[in-house]
Image: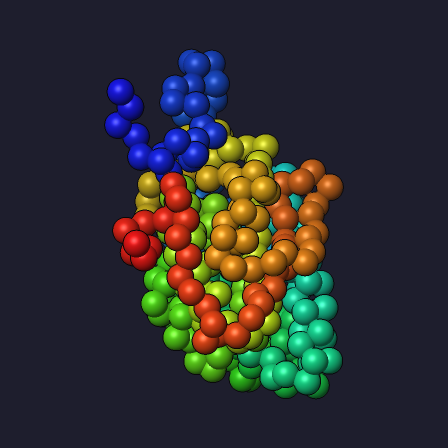
Amino acid sequence: MSHRTASEHVMPTFVPPRTPWPRAAVFVGLRFLLGTVGRLSAGVRIGWRRGFDSGESLDHVYRNVAEGITPLGRLVDRIYLGSRGWRAIRQRKAHLQETLRSVVERVHAEGRPIHLVDIAAGPGRYVLEALQAMSHLEPSAVLRDQSPAALEAGRRLAATLGVGRVRYVQGDAFDRDTLARLTPTPTIAIASGLYELVPDNRRVLDSLCGLRDGLADDGYLIYTNQPWHPQLELIARVLTNREGRPWVMRCRPQAEIDGLVRLAGFGKVGMRTDEDGIFTVSVARGSGSRDGRRPRRIEGVSGPRQPG
Ligand SMILES: C[S@@+](CC[C@H](N)C(=O)[O-])C[C@H]1O[C@@H](n2cnc3c(N)ncnc32)[C@H](O)[C@@H]1O
């Protein structure tokens, strides 16, 4: 008899439990290289210090300027920044910004205030640049993250870019109750690069339900997903995450994340993806009044906090 819970049955890690030796040896060698000479590269150093999945790590990838100690360090950084996964991340950033621009214009055309929240923004460069470009619409933003270092980096970046009307707030992106009480009430919410960090669909659903409760009536949710990744095993065996543990990504088929978004009470209205289909950026819209919302019962996914 299986002792696994319902959610464990639907969450393969996509990384084989054991790597055959020729490939394992390559991973050991690569880890050694990145832990020694690799530290000459600014990006690799940020990755080891903060986690390769950290907001600061992504910010270095977005800047895409090779930096390092000595020309060798800059060469390693250029190779690192040019990896297929990081190129797709920069494409995701472009898609996020295009999506955000069109959603902001829609909210403005509806005569509603533009209050943004990003629940795991890191330094939030993509939001800050978008706010800069749309300053005539007077948007405001609350950029949240769990990491104080990422928030501090964001405050510095906002000052450098001269972006006002933005607040950086520490908080847990999976805490349903906090998300349900966001102020000012957001008309647009962003969850980018977050859900693939956690395998458990119940936590993702908690986060989505919190956003559904916290968003204004008919508010918009912009969410990203990672259906697959070409370097999944290499990343899991070689790189560490923000907790210093192997960075095992939880890829989700698009139908799976869209299903969770729908269960939380949103209706999907659009999606962009890169040519390899590694990352998607989707838009969904809540419907109905905040008062009329009911917590949902979701068989096999919901946790003990669901009503009976
Ligand atoms: C891969 S980065 C993505 C950053 C940014 N959203 C982007 O798309 O570039 C993941 C971010 O999620 C943050 N994070 C991870 N777990 C979190 C949690 N429970 N609550 C809030 N932020 C969290 C990390 O600190 C990090 O900044």
Query: Residue 72: x, y in percent?
Result: 56, 42
Does 65 sit above or below residue 256? below
Query: Residue 4: x, y in percent?
Result: 30, 30
Colour mapping:
rainbow
104 horizontally vs 69: left or right: right
Q: Nearer the viewer, residue 41 or 96?
A: 96
- For image coordinates 66% across by 67% down, the residue present is 100
How many marks the image carries: the answer is 0
Question: Which quarter of the rendered picture does the C terminus lie within?
Answer: bottom left
- For image coordinates 38% across by 22% down, the residue present is 17
Would residue 143 be seen by someone viewing this image from the given angle? no
Question: Which quarter of the rendered picture does the N terminus lie within?
Answer: top left
Does 171 sit above or below residue 19? below
- For image coordinates 63% across by 76% down, the residue present is 131
- For image coordinates 46% across by 68% down, the residue present is 293
Instruction: Choose top left, top right, bottom left or bottom right for residue 97.
Output: bottom right
Q: Nearer the viewer, residue 243 or 22?
A: 243
Query: Residue 230: x, y in percent?
Result: 59, 32
Would residue 294 be seen by someone viewing this image from the given angle? yes
Q: Nearer the viewer, residue 152 or 223?
A: 223
Query: Residue 73: x, y in percent?
Result: 53, 45
Q: Residue furthest front?
A: 308
Does 148 sit above or below residue 193? below
Q: Nearer the viewer, residue 223 or 38?
A: 223
